[in-house]
Amino acid sequence: MNCPYHPSQSKKTTSNYREMEESIHTNFEDDMSYGDYLCLEQILTAQKPLSAQHDEMLFITIHQTSELWLKLAGHELTAAITNIQQADFGHAFKVISRVKHILNQLTQSWNILSTLTPVDYLKFRDALGHSSGFQSYGYRKLEFLLGNKNASLLAVHKNQPESYQSLNAVLHAPSLYDEVLRALAKNGLAIDKHVLERDFTQPYQQDESVLQAWLNVYQHADEHFQMYELAEKLIDIEDAFQQWRFKHMYTVQRIIGHKAGTGGSSGVSFLKKALDISFFPELFALRTHL
């Protein structure tokens, strides 16, 4: 004999239902909520499309979240520089590894943006005016921290005094690689004085004494294992950064071809030039000499 079905029993027997636990907090009138802590009201209302086109929300969201990741990457690299200055290599390795994963996350975001077709992008591109990722404070700070210094690039930030002053300070300070080279010298490896006391506002140029020092590290890895491990962490960052650069360039090419960028650059051809820039040139050059 079949038992009659009672709707009141469904919540107890179904696996698709989870009862609210009595201990869960529900009253936040006088308490901080998840949204309060993360300032979600400000963040989730910051997407303000300038057109009626559906895909503009995608474009805004990708770029806003990328700026958050860039901010975090800059935060971590700043910490890594301090760690290396203090010879705290354990923490330096941790945060450098984190930066690598942040860059991988940024690279993945281009895959999402690439679902934006050329036709749909052109429907709202004019609304962007001259705004461009080239004006990104977070990206510029990251490049300066890694050693790709170029004082002329500060010009696009001159109308934002706080950003300008912050970037100018990073421009004049030693980069991550500059501090690594100082660490090499402190560990008894011969680095020419002009490298250690160079003008930090200039982009780093490959140096023979640095190449020989790194060759020494790699040829005697057991003796210099800490420096050897640090070198490989730097390679991880450059690898991830170059993949991000390439995916950026390729996504732009996929969406706008060889049109000029909204910020006034030549577009794809300008982005391709960045692929020839190495933050740590000796670490790649030494592989030919091993």
Image: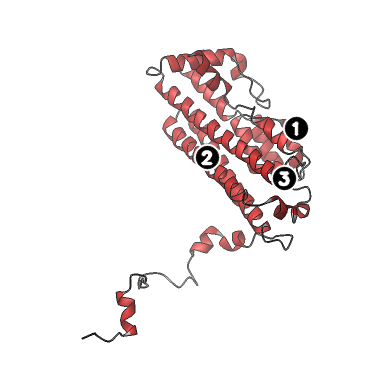
Question: Quarter-wise, where is residue 71 in the image?
Answer: top right
Residue at 67%, 44% (x, y): give it: 254
Circle 3: is it few (<14), some (14-19), or many (20+) Cα within 10 Å? some
At x 46%, y 33%, the residue is 92
Amino acid type shown at disc 2 = Glu
**Label disc, if present, on residue 256 of the rendered structure:** 3
- The alpha-carbon separation of the residues under discs 2 and 1 comes to 25 Å
At which x and y percent is residue 2? 24, 85
Residue 260, position as x, y percentages in the image? 77, 41
Q: Earlier in the sequence, mark 1 or mark 3?
A: 1
Q: Position of residue 209 (x, y in %)?
A: 56, 13
Q: Is residue 71 above or below residue 207?
A: below
> Dot 1 lies on which element?
helix
N-term mark: 2 or 3: 2
Tell me the quarter of the image containing the N terminus: bottom left
Residue 191 in sight here? no
Marks 1 and 2: in contact by CB < 8 Å? no
Q: Is residue 57 left or right of residue 12?
A: right
Say whether residue 282 is visible. Answer: yes
Give whichever of 179, 70 is nearer the camera: 70
From the viewer's side, name the closer residue of 176 and 106. 106
